[in-house]
Amino acid sequence: MRALIAMAWASVAALTAQGDTPQAPLAPALVMSPPEGLAEADVQILGGRKVADPEATWPATLKFNGGAGPCTATAIGPHVVLTAAHCVLPNQTGKITVGTVNPFSTTISCQHHPDYDEDVKLDVALCHATAAIRLPGANSAYETVRISEPPRPDTPVVLLGYGCRQEMGYGPAGVLFEGDNKIFRITTGDPWIETRGGVAVCSGDSGGGAFVPTGTLRRWMFGVNSQGDLLTRSMITSLADPKVAKFLKDWRRDGRDVKICGIDEMDDCHG
């Protein structure tokens, strides 16, 4: 079996890593932005399909450059962005920008799950936006997470990301793609949900959302793209894992007082 690898490119550096020894040299600043037009592009999610109108269908999906390559993130509340921990450094700061005409921008600060380790377990990070994130599109909504229970094996799911387009990590990246798969298994004792046999995540899809579709343009987010074999197998960090769920609930109250769709009652959440 091919070894699993974290799906961001190897080097990730920060605009600022507060409290850490300075990194040298510093990588480009962390800047997140929402979907853009397709232009000319090939498949990004391995075996997936182009998102014809990302602004209308996935406005809360953000892309950013983690230093040596792209990662993906999801706005899950007006002041909250969720991504993979291996995409950002501890306490990394940056900004979110939206649009070129009358552009919107706000600063963000990101924190790893406190028990995230070198084995890429508990591979989630939350970023706090200083100002409410203004998503593109007339009817935009933040994505809704579900932390109460994971989807069962054989449940149809949709994987999303800005990653590479060819097996083993080759091909260009940076345009939003989606693809269908099914839950293969939920690992015991680890926060993983494994998908296998359909589309697969590729380098740059890290941090992107994994969703259960419930109807036309309706879904809920069950996990974060973390690892894969760059062929057919993907490992998703489950948001229903007790340690991950506790991190989401505690983080939003830890001096921030922010709300997360699916945990808190609020408007502007995707159903």
Image (cartoon, rainbow, N blue to C red):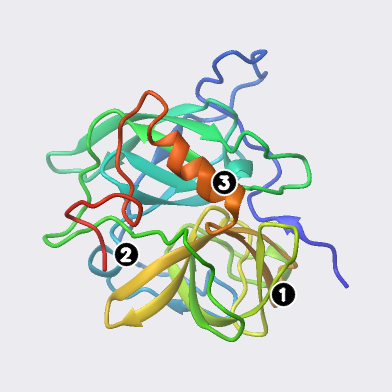
Q: What residue is at 24 percent from the left and 52 percent from the top?
A: 265
Location of residue 254 by image quarter: top left
Q: Which numbered disc, 1 or 2, marks the residue closer to the eye?
A: 2
Give the mark nearer the N terminus: 1 vs 2. 2
Look at label 3 and name its amino acid. Val
Dot label at residue 231? 1
Where does residue 88 sit, x and y in percent of width and height?
57, 36
Look at label 2 and name its amino acid. Trp
Is residue 86 placed above or below 230 in the rendered structure? above
SS for callout 3? loop
SS for callout 1? loop
Q: Which numbered disc, 3 or 2, marks the residue closer to the eye?
A: 3
Where does residue 186 sit, x and y in percent of width and height?
67, 71
Location of residue 60 by image quarter: bottom left
Neighbours of disc 1 within 10 Å: few (<14), some (14-19), many (20+): many
Where does residue 87 sit, x and y in percent of width and height?
58, 43
Of the 4 image quadrants, the one containing the N terminus is: bottom right
Pick the front one: 227 or 115: 115
Distance of label 1 from label 2 (alpha carbons): 25 Å
Q: Which residue is labeled 2 in the image? A: 58
Is residue 4 placed above or below 232 in the rendered structure? above
Q: What residue is at 54 percent from the left and 71 percent from the top?
A: 45
SS for callout 2? loop
Where does residue 36 sit, x and y in percent of width and height?
31, 58
Q: Which residue is labeled 3 in the image? A: 124
Look at label 1 and name its amino acid. Leu
CB contact under 8 Å: marks 1 and 2: no
Q: Is residue 252 left or right of residue 7?
A: left
